[in-house]
Image: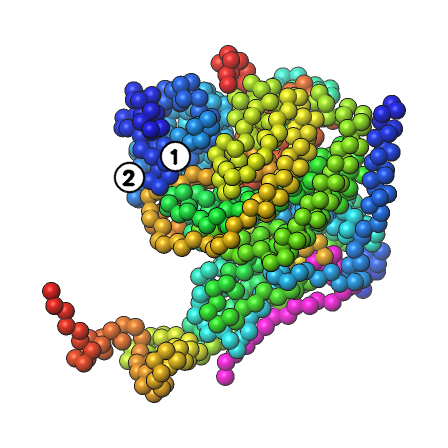
């Protein structure tokens, strides 16, 4: 009986010592620390429409659809798991995980991102080559790597299949293989 | 060599000498004809001292022309695993049941029947376990010809597969939504007055089709994020276990720093999980003061993991080959004060409750699980350690950095709810001890190994000691950069099968805390479908072979 | 029910019934966390109740598995009008990582009329507080659909 009373006293003391610990939120902000994986933010000016994020996303919420002259890249962030894979794989660093966590909404439409990017189609067969931005990036990287100029880089408007056919039909590109 | 030794022991029941897992010498694969299976199982239990873990069914018709059933055992004193594999002819998909010999195998065989369609002959309780009540018969989701997003129409007037209550008992249905149940689960208590004489259980309300997603639509590198969401409390355990299984299958050795980081996060997860349990257990018995205080003490761990990993839960750090992010540079300064505070506060709480007679009255002498029952139902984790069974995957099958760190495995002999509570309470300072050692010995260097293409057809087995017990992930690597089969066995899968024995002769008031004392995580258990038929298990328990000195 | 009447009904604090509709438990423990000392949602008069009959709002977590669907509908019917449904977490908002699995219904919105979604995996306790406050009309929405077309 006495032992029980002592234990209750100790339990009370624990509560009293802790005191009131309630955070000021929501009247004061309680921001997460750096590195927090909040709502993904996509910079539409940086995205090159390559689709790396679409392949990596475990919730498969990133869709790429080609139609006519445009590729639409869309994110259904309602089911985002905030894993950060899209940010990790993006070659253009277009995706950042923001600090935003106050994302409540009545409609999941508010959590959609949709970007329409210009497509380059093959001048020979009409198949999709990729986005204009992806082509621009290739040019930029090749120029930087070879020291050449944009004009010297050919076949940017051919799809892979047509590029192969062209290459096979160009004697100057032949490589002699001796055994 | 271990595999030769086992080969000799199994020679009259196995038609080929056993092989070791392609890249994993601790994993011994033995081929057994289905008709020899009961004898092989007896051989494994009696001669090799094996401990049953789980059974896996795989549809290998496309790749090899048969269904494959694997029964997985732990050879704890040899730090190894034994897998008995049988090939089943698709024209006659049946296999002798091993449940009469191993009561703890009851669920796994029912799950194989539900998901693959191989029927265990001689199973004492072959009811549906995992699939929803309105799921049509004859449609097996884990068969390769079933599309992961196919949704067959609902079967009208379907009823849950409940067993008939014993004569003279009243029914007390609990759930699926109930105040002390965090997850939907249906318990049909058979009572006489205040006393429980039996229980039927219909779970698997959390069946989400996790294993099918992994082998049908996700890739190897996406699965860790899926695994982490099997359970929101011990998610890191599941993602670590999956990565370890693939690493074992593919022969990938992860850098030392990654092993230590995994260890630190695993133990932080144990801290938050045990403190959460202490709070919830007190909440179940009406002691809300301690619920609030335990969660108050726990909160800094959540802030710490948000700072270390970017999120309070679902750390997103595990990937095949190591971890994806390093901890921040000032982590070594930020972590110790949090640990110090938790150690101090927990010490004070334990000191306070030890003399609390009303708490002891509720917890001592209730929910008794004898050591024999604990072994028969193959329970693990604090549930087993509270009944004197000394098993802990961190010591028995070391993984991550545990082989290099010193810690004590906490075992109690009380066999009751109080003993299981004390095991968890004692594990808190041990977890803190492990984290301190890991921080002190944290190696420099890379955090991710180079991972090349993962070859197909390899078996990988990994165990991780979750807060609730041993989690086992079995993987069979496949083509197309995804597993051919991934099987998750959560600790609650086994521990729940031991609950009927604990509830026998208890009063109704003791039921919630007794179920809660195993720290059930229905989400872990139910990643496929969880249905537990307690009455069925009780019938198995009464068979004389169970009483005749098992375990 | 008209917005004005709803606002009047919920002017005081609401009583919430928490439902796990197939959730992994991550959202559920964060919901419980808002009761605990650091967040203390009870200071706003918001409390968890143990029966839907006493509830003003359902706080639903999980993608709604096929097995739980019918029971969730019965639960919803048991809550007296006026009522709110708040979907907690990415599974509730959009079905999460298993939105297209054979075993789930793809999110609470496919089963019940939802008033507010609180995305997150799991959402922080602060995010849950924000979402409940938004359901009561106390705080504004911070997210909007983004559309961009390259010219």
Of the pair B183 and C81, the residue shown nearer to us? B183
Instruction: Give the secondary structure at mark 2.
Output: loop
Q: Is residue B42 above or below residue B421?
A: above
Query: From this viewpoint, which residue is outermost toward the left?
Result: A179
Q: Is residue C118 left or right of residue B251?
A: right
Q: Nearer the viewer, residue B15 or A63?
A: B15
**Residue B99 falls left or right of residue B306:** left
Query: Which quadrant does the N terminus of chain C fall into?
Result: bottom right
Provide residue B373's location: percent of width, then percent of height: 56, 20
Based on the displayed image, in which of its 4 quarters is residue B484 positioned?
A: top left
Circle 2 residue = B65
- Looking at the rendering, the stretch of residues picked out in magenta corresponds to C127-151
Q: Is residue C79 above or below residue B122?
A: below
Q: Residue at position x 66%, y 43% from top?
A: B272
Q: Quadrant of residue B467?
A: top right
Q: Chain of mark 2?
A: B
- Contact between marks 1 and 2 (CB within 8 A): the answer is no
Q: Which residue is mark 1?
A: B27
- The mark found on residue C117 in the picture is none
Q: Is residue C138 magenta?
A: yes
């Amino acid at each position: 009986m006495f032992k029980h009373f002592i234990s209750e006293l100790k339990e009370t003391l624990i509560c009293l010592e802790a005191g009131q610990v309630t955070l000021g939120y929501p009247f004061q902000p309680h921001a997460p620390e750096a590195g927090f994986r909040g709502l993904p933010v996509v910079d539409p000016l940086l995205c090159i429409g390559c689709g790396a994020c679409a392949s990596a996303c475990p919730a498969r919420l990133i869709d790429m659809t080609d139609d006519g002259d445009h590729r639409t890249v869309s994110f259904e962030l309602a089911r985002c798991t905030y894993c950060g894979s899209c940010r990790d794989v993006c070659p253009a660093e277009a995706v950042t995980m923001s600090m935003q966590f106050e994302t409540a909404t009545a409609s999941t439409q508010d959590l959609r991102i949709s970007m329409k990017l210009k497509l380059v189609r093959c001048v020979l067969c009409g198949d999709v080559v990729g986005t204009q931005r992806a082509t621009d990036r290739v040019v930029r990287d090749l120029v930087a790597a070879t020291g050449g100029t944009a004009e010297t880089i050919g076949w940017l408007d051919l799809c892979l299949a047509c590029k192969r056919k062209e290459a096979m039909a160009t004697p100057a590109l032949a490589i002699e293989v001796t055994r | 060599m271990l595999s030769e030794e086992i080969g000799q022991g199994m020679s009259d029941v196995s038609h080929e000498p056993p092989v070791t897992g392609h890249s994993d010498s601790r994993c011994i694969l033995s081929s057994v004809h289905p008709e020899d299976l009961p004898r092989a199982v007896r051989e494994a239990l009696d001669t090799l001292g094996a401990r049953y873990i789980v059974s896996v069914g795989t549809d290998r018709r496309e790749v090899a022309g048969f269904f494959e059933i694997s029964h997985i055992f732990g050879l704890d004193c040899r730090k190894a695993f034994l897998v008995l594999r049988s090939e089943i002819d698709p024209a006659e998909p049946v296999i002798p049941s091993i449940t009469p010999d191993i009561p703890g195998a009851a669920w796994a065989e029912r799950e194989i029947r539900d998901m693959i369609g191989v029927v265990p002959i001689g199973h004492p309780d072959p009811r549906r376990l995992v699939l929803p009540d309105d799921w049509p018969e004859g449609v097996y989701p884990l068969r390769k010809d079933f599309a992961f997003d196919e949704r067959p129409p609902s079967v009208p007037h379907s009823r849950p597969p409940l067993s008939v209550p014993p004569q003279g008992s009243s029914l007390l249905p609990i759930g699926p939504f109930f105040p002390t149940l965090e997850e939907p689960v249906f318990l049909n208590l058979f009572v006489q007055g205040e006393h429980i004489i039996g229980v039927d259980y219909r779970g698997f309300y959390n069946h989400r089709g996790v294993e099918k997603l992994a082998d049908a639509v996700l890739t190897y590198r996406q699965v860790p994020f899926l695994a982490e969401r099997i359970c929101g409390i011990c998610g890191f355990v599941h993602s670590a276990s999956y990565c370890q299984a693939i690493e074992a299958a593919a022969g990938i050795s992860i850098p030392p720093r990654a092993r230590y980081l995994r260890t630190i996060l695993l133990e932080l997860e144990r801290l938050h999980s045990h403190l959460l349990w202490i709070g919830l257990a007190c909440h179940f018995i009406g002691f809300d003061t301690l619920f609030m205080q335990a969660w108050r003490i726990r909160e800094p761990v959540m802030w710490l993991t948000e700072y270390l990993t970017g999120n309070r839960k679902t750390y997103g750090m595990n990937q095949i080959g190591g971890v994806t992010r390093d901890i921040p540079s000032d982590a070594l300064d930020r972590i110790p004060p949090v640990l110090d505070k938790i150690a101090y506060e927990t010490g004070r709480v334990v000191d306070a409750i030890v003399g609390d007679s009303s708490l002891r009255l509720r917890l001592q002498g209730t929910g008794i699980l004898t050591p024999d029952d604990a072994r028969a139902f193959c329970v693990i984790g604090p549930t087993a350690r509270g009944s004197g069974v000394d098993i802990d995957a961190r010591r028995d099958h070391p993984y991550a950095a545990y082989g290099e760190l010193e810690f004590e495995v906490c075992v109690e002999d009380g066999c009751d709810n109080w003993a299981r509570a004390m095991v968890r309470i004692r594990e808190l300072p041990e977890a803190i001890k492990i984290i301190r050692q890991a921080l002190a010995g944290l190696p420099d260097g890379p955090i991710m190994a180079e991972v090349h293409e993962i070859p197909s057809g390899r078996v990988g087995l990994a165990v991780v000691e979750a807060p609730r017990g041993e989690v086992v992930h079995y993987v069979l690597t496949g083509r197309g950069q995804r597993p051919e089969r991934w099987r998750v066995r959560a600790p609650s899968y086994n521990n729940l099968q031991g609950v009927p024995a604990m509830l026998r002769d208890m009063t109704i008031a003791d039921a919630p805390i007794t179920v809660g004392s195993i720290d059930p995580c229905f989400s872990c258990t139910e990643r496929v479908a969880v249905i537990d038929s307690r009455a069925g298990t009780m019938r198995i328990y009464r068979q004389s072979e169970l009483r005749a000195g098992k375990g | 029910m008209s917005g004005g009447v709803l606002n009047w009904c919920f002017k005081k604090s609401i009583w919430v019934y928490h439902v796990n509709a197939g959730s992994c438990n991550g959202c559920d423990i964060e919901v419980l966390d808002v009761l605990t000392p650091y967040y203390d949602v009870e200071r706003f008069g918001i409390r968890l109740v143990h029966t839907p009959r006493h509830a003003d709002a359902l706080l639903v977590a999980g993608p709604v598995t096929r097995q739980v669907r019918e029971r969730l509908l019965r639960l919803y019917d048991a809550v007296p009008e006026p009522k709110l449904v708040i979907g907690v977490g990415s599974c509730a908002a959009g079905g999460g990582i298993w939105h297209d699995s054979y075993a789930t219904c793809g999110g609470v919105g496919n089963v019940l009329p939802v008033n507010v979604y609180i995305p997150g995996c799991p959402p922080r306790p602060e995010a849950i507080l924000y979402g409940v406050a938004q359901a009561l009309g106390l705080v504004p929405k911070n997210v909007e659909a983004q559309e961009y077309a390259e010219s």
